[in-house]
Amino acid sequence: MITITKSQADTLKAVEAEFGNGVFPLVISVENTMPRNVVFPELDSMLLFPAGHEKSKGNYKVSNLDLLKRFVSSVSQIAELNGFDEAMRVSSAENMNVKAAREAANAPKAAPKNAPNSA
């Protein structure tokens, strides 16, 4: 999970580290932590209500890393202009599943129990 803050450079580095090797398109989970409604055309004009509202969270499909970076950049700018230390939290269950699948594929394989003994 990354936290989008008013520090755009740090947030973009975190996005690259978290999602840079991900498989796109992917679905991200977004939580608005700002005390205001927000709309972002980058993610199909998503509307998120203020922090604490039942509609302050949602899942959105992102087609590529550049689009995700544009979204994060927009959120960081809003945070900076309004003096919010934290603006949103973004995570992806799909990205976690991709990492788990890669780790499983690279794990050492055990010989089947009924395999003939080669001794």
Image (tube, rainbow, N blue to C red):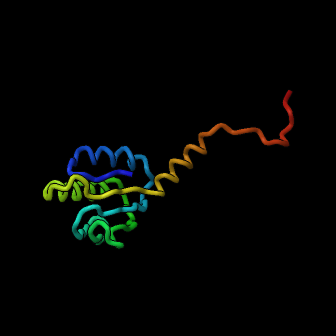
> Residue drawn 52% across and 53% down?
97
Q: Position of residue 13 (x, y in %)?
A: 30, 44
> Residue drawn 56% across and 49% down?
101
**Residue at the limit of the structure toward the top, as seen here:** 119
**Quadrant of the rendered image containing residue 38:** bottom left
> Residue drawn 14% across and 59% down?
82
> Residue drawn 69% across and 39% down?
109
**Which is nearer the eye, 44 or 52?**
52
**Which is nearer the eye, 73 or 6?**
6
**Residue at the limit of the structure toward the front, as seen here:** 52
Q: Position of residue 95 (x, y in %)?
A: 46, 53
Q: Position of residue 83 (x, y in %)?
A: 15, 55
- Vertical side of 85 occupied by 103: above or below: above
**Which is nearer the eye, 3 or 65?**
3
- Vertical side of 73 occupied by 117: above or below: above
- Vertical side of 89 occupied by 119: above or below: above
**Quadrant of the rendered image containing residue 64:** bottom left
